[in-house]
Image (cartoon, rainbow, N blue to C red):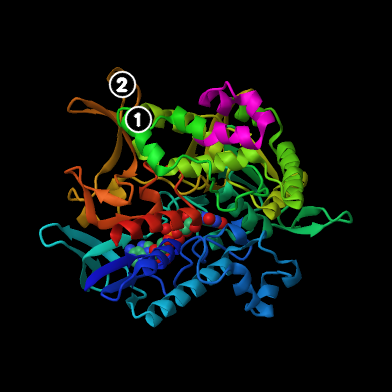
Amino acid sequence: METIAIIGAGPSGLFMLKNLLKHSKQNRVISIFEKKQNLGAGMPYSEEGANVEHVTNVSANEIPELVTSVAEWLEGVPADVLDFYKINANHLNEYKVLPRLLFGSYLEAQFHLLLLAAERSGVTINLYLNATITDIKDSASSNIVKISLENGDHFEFNRVVICTGHSWPKNLEGKIDGYFDSPYPPAKLKFKANHPVAIKGSSLTAIDAIRTLSRFNGNYFLNEDKELQFEKNADSPEFKIVMHSRSGLLPAVRFHLEDSHLASNYLLSDREIEEHIQNNEGFLSLDYIFDQDFKKILLERDPNLYATIASMKLEEFTETMLNYREGFDAFELLRQEYENAARSINRKESIYWKELLAILSFALNYPAKYLAAEDMMRLQKSLMPLISVVIAFVPQTSAAELLALHQAGVLEIIAVGEDSEVVENSSGGINYNYIDETGTQSVYYKTFVNCVGQPHLSIDSFPFKGLCDGTITPATLKFKNKDTGKKAIGENKNVFKSNEDFLLNVPGIRINDDFQVVGDDGKANDRIFVMVVPYIGGYNPDYSGLDFCEEASGRIANALL
Ligand SMILES: Cc1cc2nc3c(=O)[nH]c(=O)nc-3n(C[C@H](O)[C@H](O)[C@H](O)COP(=O)(O)OP(=O)(O)OC[C@H]3O[C@@H](n4cnc5c(N)ncnc54)[C@H](O)[C@@H]3O)c2cc1C
């Protein structure tokens, strides 16, 4: 009997089980450990990450295949549940986003259907709920991985896939009044705030906080022209939300995707990428992938835009696109993008360059570990800021709420540049310090919510200390040009010398293409696989979302079985 453990039964654990079952033979036992009572929903789609007002940023047709489709599953959802979420069954279609908690119920139902399918096909599954894993220890000599539970139990397995997901470390929350290290769980933001609230960040995490705070300090209604409006509660006259972001940009609005699964037949194949790496001294060139997986496809899809960017290098392209956004008032651009996105959805016509940027980001995710340190620094400095605003894909209802809040004078955004700081106040609240065109500012806020999104965490905070004996190691990238590396040592605290090489520390741990951890002997460990969002961002810069759960678990299942 081969024994496999899945640790964590959120969306990653769900897709892991699905992909293992595709291959499973009857001489395999799969054990699943989940610290909560519920399966499938994980953090974003349970009360840990959502209230009733929070919605997914993908629609049903963008969700990788599970057992039943969302549409089929919704047909069986009782009318009172749909009423609770204010969903009109006649208006449902596969292009609509869903309340995250309802979507969590869908994922839970899929988990149970998979368990049923496993039972029917004779695969043994041991399910442990309310089972928190506290440590993991690898033994190469006995080819066994030992896991320890909070209740004192121990188990041994041949293979372990760690799917323990999101982690939001608490720093000052609970110590400083009015200070929130993240907006999760969002129930903590259900309070009256008769004062301006500072938010750090302006993307989807910020929107989660805004959706909750606004509902507890006012209400939304439709005017005669069916436009969404907001009005403050009588007892919150001073309520206001101020977003702070580096460049003062808001994320782009969801539009119609031509390929809802962000695939493209025109993308470089794994084999082509491998050949390129071999012929390029073992490195993936960022310029090559930008040319092949973005520009070349843009030529096919939007020749006019291609003509204007054809001669641009990556940096010039990202600067042009960001400058274009910065040239507008952020809310005016949001309104325009909201209208353009509505047209795109009605006509089922993509906005190609944005779709291609999402595809590029997805395509880059896996081979990013082969980038030279120089190219990773370019990616972080140039491409990621554009990707993060363009492919966040704000759902229509969220965009409408942001516009209504802004129109009511309740929401604004401030560009605070690279060097702003948030200084906590021991008697409560914070001061937001930044420089703008009028000089140095230091603004006091009684309430502060850090909404920068899931932080990339370092190996030091990895939850299973038994693996920190050299079984897991920090992720690094090598400089292609030693002179550049040598020069970077003084300028960048993440650069260091090891033997004759210059290396850049990137967030998280080292994994190979199959998500196996790489130890201090430089070898991939064929017993331990990791798909834990906060710890693999260094080698997978855009790792998040259900499409990645599907892709990563598919690769793990192929390697594992
Ligand atoms: C707020 C938010 C909204 C998002 N919305 C979307 C969206 O709309 N669309 C989209 O595609 N992506 C979205 N994402 C991306 C999201 O990362 C993935 O969809 C998904 O949650 C990742 O699943 P996971 O199972 O890896 O992690 P998690 O969802 O965090 O699940 C991890 C599971 O492991 C369990 N666990 C943790 N530690 C232990 C332990 N020690 N022992 C046992 N069990 C443990 C947890 O209880 C949990 O069930 C969102 C992310 C966030 C944070």
The residue range painted magenta reads 293-319
Please state the horizontal and vertical placement of residue 212, each as a whole percent of the image: 62, 58
Q: Quadrant of ligand 1?
A: bottom left
* Residue 177, numbered circle: none
Q: Residue at x 39, y 77 (%)?
A: 118
Image position of 222 with respect to 349: above or below: below
Q: Circle 2 sits in a helix, a strand or a loop, which is it?
A: loop
Residue 313 within the magenta-colored segment of the rendering: yes
- Percent x, y of residue 451: 53, 47
Q: Residue 282: horizontal and vertical position, in percent?
A: 30, 32
Whether the residues at callouts 2 and 1 have beta carbons within 8 Å, the answer is yes
Q: At 33% from the left edge and 51% from the top edge, which residue is drawn? A: 514
Picture residue at 42% right of the left edge, 61% below the top: 12
Which residue is at the far left?
141
Which element carries disc 1, helix, strand or loop? loop
Amino acid type of the residue that numbered disc 2 sits on in the rendered structure: Asn
Q: Which residue is mark 1?
A: 372
Tag 1: residue type? Ala
Q: Residues within 10 Å of mark 1 (few under 14, many from 20)?
A: many
Q: Residue at x 40, y 38 (%)?
A: 272
* Membership of 211 in magenta stretch: no
